[in-house]
Image (cartoon, rainbow, N blue to C red):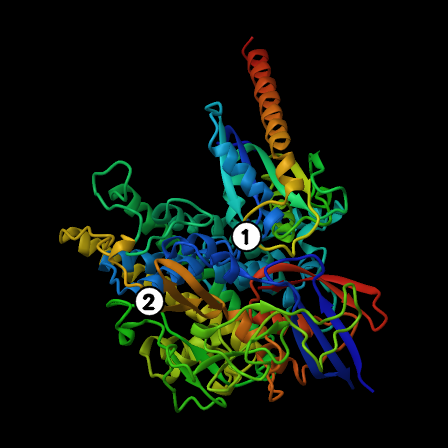
């Protein structure tokens, strides 16, 4: 089933960065693009990509997603979810949730789901316009980046252990 | 007595779309369309470098991202008097055609088909009969009995797992579904094939635009260097790949999309008399063959048709202050000159003035302001924009390519030309222009190869890229035909910065509220007299609204009079 998937880890930030906090995923991806990352980690600004992103989900074994959510938690709350089905995605994902849920459904139907790790950041509103984050969200950006990198490291390390186990 | 039902996406973006419809004796008597999401891109752009505007507007929408960027660079080029080299025009056109191919196929199979195709019923189809049917309408190779029986099993398993997923929101079994089981299965199989297909054609954008989503554009040309032997630029290998993608894309459209469209349409001819609405159509035109200034060379001609009179096409001028104007009588904005004036976008204002109820609410007061969309008018007329407008204008202008595909479709379906003014006509027109765009894409590609062979590799004119070469003040308008309809941006540049930037987007034309004279816009008008068999499952409303292809996928909640959720479905709201 795992025909010729890219073994690299793809970190994908999604959202609309014209809508303030809604764009937190994209802003995080842009920070990560400026950083020195291991060669087997790639970063994509997925924007409001919708079905355009199917190719990426199909071609990587592991995808770390970053997105905003309107879930009435304290703004800036960061959660890590490992969705297996579309219904595991938070109900009130922001702009693109139907797009993303549909895509996960499609991947499942096609039998091509990658391992998805989803970081969601709680935001207060999507009615806000502008390309800057509110202080509540800006403040948690370093923590968000740190958590993403920690997960990335964990995934890499585990894969290495698996490889050694297979080789011996 | 009439009963009002509400179709409203709750937490979605790209301008939530809400429809309130009054139903009497099984038919829609009155309808109101409201954009409940504030959009103030104008404010984000003010004071910025005009050369960067394309990157911001490209993010306005998730689906037709590249068309906003294209129209934006055209706007700035118009203001500064920049003429792009022929190759840049061709590359833009090829990307444009690829966008149409992607967008229209995805709309048909993934956003609109389930309004006509009953997935659950497809599970009852006979794979052998489906195979015979498929082979009788197309030479597409995936048509064996085994293939359809595999698809059926795969979907059956999926449905039985309880994860209905994509298919969770349908009105399966609704009496308005008319297809035989075999056509349902055929369409379902192609739904899955189109999912895989669509991710290929968008690669054209990544090749020429450097990335996807949100490909790169450039004021003055395109940001891709042509060098046949260049490793990093547009080289022979990449061009061959583009050709392959465009050819395969065209094959799918000719052999799958069009035959399916015709097969499905033949069961729904009654929809050739439903959902017509305004009867006024507007297109700005697009796909220049000879520079953007030569409007006669456009593959999509511009023009306006009034009252379904296709014997006369009126000319349209986006620069004339008395032609395109935006009104706010029913929109949550205020103008300095008051609510009753119409402003040409060069003098446009974007000051929000929300006077609606505090959400959540049951009904909007539609006698007052009830939408965040302004109401654009052409010479005072409400106009429909989109595939049907483009196809009718091409047809009415006597363009042979349009006549060929339209007349063939009318003959095959055995319906009169008046059937075009309808929900069915809108959905059919989208397929027909997609077929044309696929052909034209190959024509543009071949011309690009010819130019390169002749030694022309120019891709940008940067002579006016430096702001020190610009006048102190400049105004410009850029326009085009987005997949959903006529799109234009207007810019005022002062001291090298954006002083004002106004966008009038297709869905504003179609989904806007009434104007000061009480004239409806396209969505509202198209719903009048639509039959609704079951007001708790208003599939018919969804069909007509979806036929316009509102842009971004939006969740819709259907409420009864008392505001309790009765059903959840999907609608698309730009």
Which image quadrant is residue B20 in?
bottom right
Task: Give the x, y percent position of residue B454.
Answer: 13, 54
The CA distance from mark 2 to mark 1 is 26 Å
User: In the visual, does B363 lie left or right of B242?
Assistant: right
Q: Give the vertical position of B50 relative to B425 (above or below).
A: above
Task: Give the x, y percent position of residue B206.
Answer: 40, 46
Q: Quadrant of the N terminus of chain B?
A: bottom right
From where the camera sits, is residue B150 visible?
A: no
Which image quadrant is residue B54 in?
bottom left
Q: Residue at point 37% right, 44% down?
A: B210
Residue named by callout 2: B474
Task: Give the x, y percent position of residue B151.
Answer: 61, 50
From where the camera sits, is residue B279 visible?
A: yes
- Looking at this view, is B324 or B296 the one in front? B324
Q: Residue at point 33% right, 67% down?
A: B474
Q: Residue at point 28% right, 63% down?
A: B471
Q: Secondary structure at mark 1?
A: loop
Task: Give the x, y percent position of residue A3.
Answer: 51, 32
Q: Give the vertical position of A21 relative to B417 (above or below).
A: above
User: Is the residue marked by circle 1 packed among few (<14), some (14-19), or many (20+) residues within 10 Å?
Assistant: many
Which image quadrant is residue A79 in?
top right
Chain of the residue on which disc 2 is drawn: B
- Looking at this view, is A137 or B310 the one in front? A137
Chain of the residue on which disc 1 is drawn: A
Residue named by callout 1: A18
């Amino acid at each position: 089933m795992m025909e010729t998937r890219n073994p690299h880890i793809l970190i994908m930030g999604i959202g609309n960065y014209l809508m303030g906090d809604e764009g937190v995923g994209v802003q995080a991806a842009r920070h990560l693009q400026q950083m020195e990352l291991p060669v087997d980690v790639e970063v994509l600004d997925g924007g409001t990509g919708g079905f355009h992103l199917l190719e990426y989900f199909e071609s990587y074994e592991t995808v770390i997603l970053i997105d905003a959510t309107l879930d009435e938690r304290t703004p800036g709350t960061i959660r890590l979810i490992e969705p297996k089905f579309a219904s595991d995605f938070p109900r009130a994902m922001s702009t693109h949730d139907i797009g993303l849920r549909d895509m996960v459904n499609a991947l499942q139907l096609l039998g091509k789901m990658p391992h998805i790790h989803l970081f969601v950041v709680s935001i207060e509103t999507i009615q806000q316009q502008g390309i800057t984050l509110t202080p509540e969200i800006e403040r948690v950006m370093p923590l968000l980046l740190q958590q993403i990198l920690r997960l990335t490291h964990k995934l890499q390390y585990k894969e290495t252990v698996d490889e050694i186990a297979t080789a011996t | 007595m009439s009963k009002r039902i509400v179709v409203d996406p709750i937490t979605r973006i790209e301008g939530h779309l809400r429809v309130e419809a009054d139903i009497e004796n099984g038919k829609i008597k009155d309808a109101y369309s409201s954009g409940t999401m504030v959009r103030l891109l104008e404010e984000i752009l003010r004071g910025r470098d005009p050369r960067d505007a394309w990157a911001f507007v490209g993010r306005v929408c998730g689906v037709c991202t590249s068309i906003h960027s294209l129209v934006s660079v055209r706007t700035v080029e118009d203001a500064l008097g920049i003429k792009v080299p022929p190759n840049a025009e061709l590359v833009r056109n090829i990307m444009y055609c690829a966008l149409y191919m992607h967008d229209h196929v995805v709309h048909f199979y993934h956003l609109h088909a389930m309004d006509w195709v009953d997935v659950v019923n497809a599970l009852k189809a006979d794979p052998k009969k489906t195979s015979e049917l498929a082979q009788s309408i197309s030479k597409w190779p995936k048509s064996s009995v085994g293939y359809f029986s595999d698809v059926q099993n795969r979907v059956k398993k999926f449905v039985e797992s309880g994860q209905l997923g994509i298919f969770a929101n349908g009105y399966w079994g609704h009496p308005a579904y008319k297809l035989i089981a075999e056509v349902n299965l055929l369409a379902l199989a192609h739904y899955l094939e189109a999912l895989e297909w669509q991710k290929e054609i968008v690669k054209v954008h990544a090749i020429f635009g450097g990335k996807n989503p949100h490909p790169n554009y450039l004021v003055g040309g395109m940001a891709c260097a042509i060098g046949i032997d260049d490793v990093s630029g547009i080289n022979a290998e990449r061009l061959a790949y583009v050709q392959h993608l465009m050819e395969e894309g065209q094959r799918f459209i000719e052999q799958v999309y069009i035959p399916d469209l015709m097969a499905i349409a033949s069961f729904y001819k009654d929809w050739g008399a439903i959902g017509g609405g305004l009867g006024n159509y507007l297109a700005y035109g697009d796909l220049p063959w000879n520079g953007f200034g030569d409007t006669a060379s456009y593959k999509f001609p511009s023009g306006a048709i009034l009252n379904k009179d296709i014997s006369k096409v009126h000319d349209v001028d986006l620069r004339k202050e008395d032609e395109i104007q935006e009104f706010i009588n029913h929109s949550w904005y205020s103008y300095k000159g008051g609510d009753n004036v119409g402003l040409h976008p060069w003098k446009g204002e974007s000051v929000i003035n929300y006077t609606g109820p505090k959400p959540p609410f049951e009904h909007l007061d539609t006698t007052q302001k009830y939408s965040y969309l302004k109401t654009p008018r052409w010479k005072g007329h409400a106009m429909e924009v989109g595939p049907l407008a483009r196809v009718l204008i091409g047809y009415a202008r006597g363009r042979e390519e349009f006549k060929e595909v339209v007349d063939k479709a009318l003959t095959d379906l055995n319906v009169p030309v008046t059937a075009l003014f309808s929900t069915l006509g809108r959905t059919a027109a989208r397929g027909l222009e997609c077929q044309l765009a696929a052909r034209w894409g190959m024509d543009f590609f071949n011309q690009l190869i010819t130019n390169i062979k002749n030694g022309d590799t120019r891709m940008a004119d940067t002579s006016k890229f430096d702001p020190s070469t610009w006048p102190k003040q400049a105004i410009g308008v850029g326009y085009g035909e987005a997949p959903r309809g006529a799109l234009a941006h207007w810019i005022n540049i002062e001291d090298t910065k954006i002083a004002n930037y106004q966008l009038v987007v297709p869905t504003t034309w179609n989904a806007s509220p009434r104007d000061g004279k009480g004239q409806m816009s396209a969505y509202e008008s198209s719903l009048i007299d639509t039959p609704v068999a079951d007001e708790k499952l208003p599939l018919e409303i969804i069909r007509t609204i979806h036929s316009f292809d509102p842009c971004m996928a939006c969740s819709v909640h259907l409420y009864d009079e008392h505001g309790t959720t009765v059903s959840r479905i999907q609608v698309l709201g730009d």
